[in-house]
Image (tube, coloured by chain):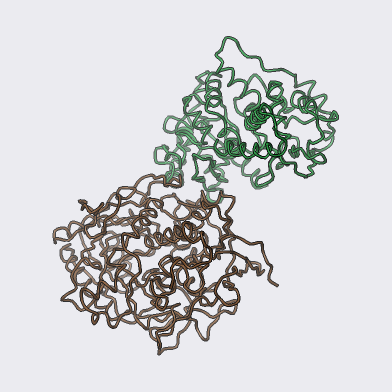
Chain colours: A brown, B green
């Protein structure tokens, strides 16, 4: 028996970064907003208590803050000829759970994509010809870098990003990233104080004519009060960012930048431990009536709402659309349907340089404290004589020296036993690592749909992920590994090891939680699920907000762009949608 | 302040529409609403998230529980059938409508100092509040205290109806501050030590007292235990925002700041600061004995592991986020109830327009035993220029017991 609840103006599915941004913006507009969050309430002092926040076994190894597969998992395969099987454990990527979402346990790398990233298809076609991207399914986003600039700015000032501008209003800035698009002003906070390994990496890069700069970081380089009047503390370099909540109010998240203000508003409410089962559509399927959700006691509710915002993790946004009949599910055979189309996954690779005579004190660290070289990222270099498109940022960001996980050893070292133990002691302080954060370009056969066999605890089909690294992206990654090898040689350790990306995506070892696409934005409703304001083409009172909107991923971490897209969607709702609610903002 | 102004405007618009109220009456209601701010009526009479003034959460007194009643103008369950004379009499003497005797949890021993004009204004405002039907059984005391007539004897021993008398030798600002602190602001209700009968001990006015599991600290100008190290501006900033360089309000004071002091006018806050800074200028010359060195060493180790990441290796804290432990008057109080409570249970900071972050001290009761809490508090109380008596594990155990009851 489903209980019917009183109507709300807006219901938001998921209270992470995007849900909190949208809720704060729309409550400012005077709307009555409800957020429904599948996981628990989480707050700094109670949930990231200084006494146990840095429990590596609990949070990193046993992954206490993450979505557990018993709640929701998905099936996976590498190509459409295979039968997908359920992931019994998350490994390659780790979706978040609970208030704050994955924004609780991220590292804090906060990038802007470039104008050339937003015009991928047009740019690559113009430069290298259509044949070069014939085996890819890349798209333009339908926005420009200039369109996005104010929203990046808004997110960076909300989150107190520490960094150094490379280009302010067209003027190149010494020490910043010379390849970035013009920005209106510098970051709100100066770069973090640099540790030893990134300092050496930057020196090596500079000596090779490359352009290293401090990685833009959501770990605070100093105490900062954001435009909402919320204060964050200076980062203590404890090295427990990724997989952990911050006990010191030093890493930006919904908890440290939005919730203290949002939770005090009379027109906002959050219901935690409540899972949305589907969006309910009116007959005809052209508008949403609200959502059906189930609480932890198994009670089912219908929550009517005028506007439904899907703000869950990108993959879960896509599955909710599929389960609710919002848009048509993509079919790789016909290339018809838009929901599930253009699923992409960051293409990473890494290098380790081993020394005898250096001590990097790797435990003095923060999730985004490091240096980046963008000379081989995106459109920063000419691909004319090359056999691929795309690129990667090369990052030296030693995020931690945690005792269980940080065990670098020379190639050929046994994987266990006394020889391994001895090698980890030798390698712990004296190993320098860096990596490439590679672009991921869409193909026809990398996609998401519903699994025909496996179901979740409520009897709903699991989502099926069909993915392998495209040949183009492998070639890109190999090219980047060659460039990283040159830097490794320059660094001059006693030995180095390059971990190259290979075909055959494996869902077990951790790679990145940068799953993008599946409900992509664009200007053509036949090739995108949402318009350029993230409004569903098919059900205009539904907006789908997150990395699910990326047509393909650039060689950068996605959160900065997710935050900017959330502010842009909020702006469109406040200033345009509400004038004529329920109507499409863009005519198909 | 903006919120208050908006509420007033909205309230007046309604009034003008309903009964074309005279301008002087409107002025009186506005003044009365401000009296309700000074007196922090909502602090006790409004339940968190509840309808304004329709009854509050139980007050746990040493004598038993009392529930602040409904003071909206509802004639059945509120004060709708009171007259202004009833109200004035209650504020002045603790004897309300139909001769019912109030318990001094209602701070009539302070309100008795209020002027007739201020009480009349407050009454004018209370008559305009939305009447809410909510029956409250205020008296939850055990026998024989539940017999209200027992307050006849209490009043005889402990209470005299004394109006506020300005000190002509002091400036008007000082007198205004004295009036607010002693009268409507009823600061002594929490901050003045009580006799065994629960009456204020006037000889130690505002020198700190224990209530509801917190120690309301000394707020005289004593350099050691009081506000001697605070400037007037520090004090004004604290009362206005809940946060200053020395301290961040939490617990019952956070509620007082949120409901009352943050809404006072700047002139009144200045007056309060001037008055408080004039009290008890005794520098507290007696230096406490140096604590045992072994406990200082143990305490320092605990401090480094558990506290220094936020409060700093030197106790300097971090602005509005983590309170400084140097020059923080809470640290130096003789009574360590609040300190032990903060370490054991944690506490969330005040929320005001100017202090929105609401950072929280985490609970460490699960991690530190009584001796460890005592050691780290002893260390903090005797480092970086702080000097206060050592804390015993028994002091901590008592607070832990109260928290787990």
Q: Residue at x 57, y 9 (%)?
A: B169
Q: Residue at x 60, y 20 (%)?
A: B178
- In the depicted view, which residue is nearer to us: B349 or A357? B349
Q: x, y (%) of residue A316?
A: 49, 71
- Determine the image quadrant of residue B158: top right
Q: Nearer the viewer, residue B310 or A521?
A: A521
Q: Decide if residue B320 is in sight here.
A: yes
On screen, B337 above or below A538? above
Which residue lies most toward the bottom here?
A81
- Quadrant, the C terminus of chain A: bottom left
Left or right, A191 with reference to B133 = left
Q: Quadrant of residue A506?
A: bottom left
Location of residue A548 (image quadrant): bottom left
* Lateral position of residue B300 relative to residue A153, left or right: right
In the image, A130 versus A294, the foreground residue is A130
> How many dots with numbers?
0
Give coordinates of residue B280: x percent, y percent.
Answer: 55, 19
Residue B394 can be seen in this image: no
Q: Is residue B298 left or right of residue B8?
A: left
B148 vs A126: above or below? above
């Amino acid at each position: 028996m489903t209980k019917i609840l009183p109507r709300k103006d807006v219901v938001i599915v998921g209270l992470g970064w995007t849900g909190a941004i949208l809720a704060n913006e729309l409550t400012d507009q005077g709307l009555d907003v409800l957020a429904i969050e599948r996981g628990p309430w989480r707050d700094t002092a109670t949930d990231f208590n200084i006494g146990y926040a840095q429990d590596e076994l609990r949070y990193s190894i046993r992954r206490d803050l993450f979505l557990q597969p018993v709640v929701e998992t998905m099936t996976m395969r590498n190509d459409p000829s295979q039968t997908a099987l359920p992931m019994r454990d998350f490994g390659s990527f780790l979706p978040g759970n609970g208030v704050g979402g994955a924004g609780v346990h991220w590292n804090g790398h906060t990038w802007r994509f470039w104008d050339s990233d937003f015009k991928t298809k047009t740019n690559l076609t113009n430069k290298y010809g259509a044949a070069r991207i014939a085996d890819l399914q890349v798209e333009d986003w339908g926005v420009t870098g200039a369109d996005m600039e104010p929203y990046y700015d808004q997110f960076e000032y909300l989150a107190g990003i520490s960094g150094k501008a490379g280009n302010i209003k067209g003027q190149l800035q010494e020490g910043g990233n010379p390849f970035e698009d013009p920005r209106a002003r510098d970051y709100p906070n100066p770069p973090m104080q640099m540790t030893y390994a990134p300092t050496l990496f930057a020196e090596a890069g500079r000596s090779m004519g490359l352009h290293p700069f401090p990685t833009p970081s959501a770990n605070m380089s100093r105490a900062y009060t954001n435009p909402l009047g919320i204060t964050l503390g200076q980062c203590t370099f404890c090295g427990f960012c990724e997989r952990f909540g911050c006990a010191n109010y030093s890493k930006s998240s919904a908890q440290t930048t939005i919730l203290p203000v949002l939770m005090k508003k009379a027109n906002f409410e959050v219901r935690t431990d409540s899972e949305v089962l589907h969006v309910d559509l009116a007959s005809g399927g052209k508008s949403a009536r609200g959502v059906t959700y189930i609480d932890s006691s198994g009670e089912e509710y219908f929550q009517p709402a005028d506007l439904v915002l899907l703000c869950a993790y990108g993959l879960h946004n896509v599955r909710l659309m599929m389960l609710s009949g919002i848009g048509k599910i993509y079919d790789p055979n016909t290339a018809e349907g838009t929901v599930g189309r253009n699923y992409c996954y960051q293409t990473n690779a890494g290098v380790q340089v081993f020394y005898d005579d250096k001590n990097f004190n790797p435990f003095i660290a923060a999730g985004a404290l490091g240096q980046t070289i963008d000379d081989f990222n995106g459109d920063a270099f000419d691909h004319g004589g090359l056999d691929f498109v795309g690129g990667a940022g090369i990052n030296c960001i030693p995020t931690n020296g945690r005792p269980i996980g940080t065990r670098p050893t020379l190639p050929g070292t046994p994987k266990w036993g006394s020889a391994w133990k001895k090698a980890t002691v030798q390698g712990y302080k004296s190993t320098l690592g860096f990596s490439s954060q590679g672009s991921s370009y869409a193909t026809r056969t990398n996609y998401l749909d519903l699994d025909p066999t496996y179901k979740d605890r409520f009897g709903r089909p699991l989502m099926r992920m069909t993915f392998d690294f495209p040949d183009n992206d492998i070639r890109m990654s190999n090219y980047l590994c060659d460039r990283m090898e040159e830097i490794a040689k320059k660094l001059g350790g006693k030995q180095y090891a390059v971990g190259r990306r290979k075909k055959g995506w494996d869902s077990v070892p951790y790679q990145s939680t940068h799953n993008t696409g599946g409900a992509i934005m664009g200007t053509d409703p036949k090739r995108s699920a949402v318009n350029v304001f993230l409004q569903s083409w098919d059900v205009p009172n539904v907006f789908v907000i997150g990395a699910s909107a990326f047509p393909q991923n650039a060689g950068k971490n996605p959160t900065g762009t997710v935050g900017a897209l959330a502010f842009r969607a909020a702006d469109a709702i406040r200033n345009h949608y509400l004038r004529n609610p329920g109507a499409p903002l863009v005519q198909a | 302040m903006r919120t208050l102004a908006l509420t007033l405007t909205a309230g007046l618009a309604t009034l003008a529409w309903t009964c074309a109220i005279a301008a002087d009456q409107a002025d009186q209601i506005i003044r009365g609403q401000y009296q309700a701010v000074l007196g922090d009526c909502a602090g006790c009479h409004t339940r968190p998230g509840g309808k304004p003034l329709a009854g509050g959460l139980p007050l746990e007194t040493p004598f038993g529980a009392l529930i602040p009643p409904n003071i909206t103008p509802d004639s059945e369950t509120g004060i709708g059938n009171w007259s202004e004379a009833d109200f004035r009499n209650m504020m002045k003497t603790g004897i309300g409508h139909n001769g019912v005797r109030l318990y001094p949890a209602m701070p009539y021993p302070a309100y008795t100092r209020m002027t007739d004009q201020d009480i009349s204004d407050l009454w004018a405002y209370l008559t305009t509040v939305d009447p809410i039907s909510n029956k409250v059984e205020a008296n939850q005391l055990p026998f024989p205290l539940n017999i209200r007539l027992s307050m006849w004897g209490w009043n005889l021993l402990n209470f005299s109806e004394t109006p506020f008398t300005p000190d002509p030798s002091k400036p008007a600002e000082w007198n205004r501050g004295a009036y607010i602190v002693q009268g409507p602001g009823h600061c002594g209700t929490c901050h003045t030590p009580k006799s065994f009968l629960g009456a204020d001990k006037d000889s130690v006015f505002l020198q700190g007292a224990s209530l509801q599991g917190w120690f309301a600290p000394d707020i005289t100008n004593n350099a050691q235990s009081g506000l001697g190290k605070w400037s007037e501006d520090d004090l004004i900033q604290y009362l206005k925002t809940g946060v200053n360089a020395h301290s961040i309000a939490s617990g019952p004071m956070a509620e007082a700041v949120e409901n009352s002091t943050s809404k006072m006018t700047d002139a009144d806050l200045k007056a309060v600061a001037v008055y408080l800074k004039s009290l008890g200028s005794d520098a507290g010359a007696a230096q406490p004995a140096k604590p045992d060195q072994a406990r200082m060493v143990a305490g320092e180790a605990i401090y480094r592991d558990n506290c220094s990441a936020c409060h700093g290796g030197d106790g300097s804290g971090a602005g509005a986020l983590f309170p400084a432990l140097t020059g923080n008057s809470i640290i130096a109080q003789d009574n360590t109830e609040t300190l032990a409570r903060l370490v054991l249970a944690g506490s969330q900071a005040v929320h005001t327009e100017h202090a929105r972050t609401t950072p929280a001290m985490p609970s460490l009761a699960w991690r530190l035993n009584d001796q460890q809490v005592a050691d780290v508090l002893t260390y903090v109380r005797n480092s970086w220029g702080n000097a206060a008596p050592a804390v015993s594990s028994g002091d901590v155990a008592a607070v832990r017991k109260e928290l787990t009851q």
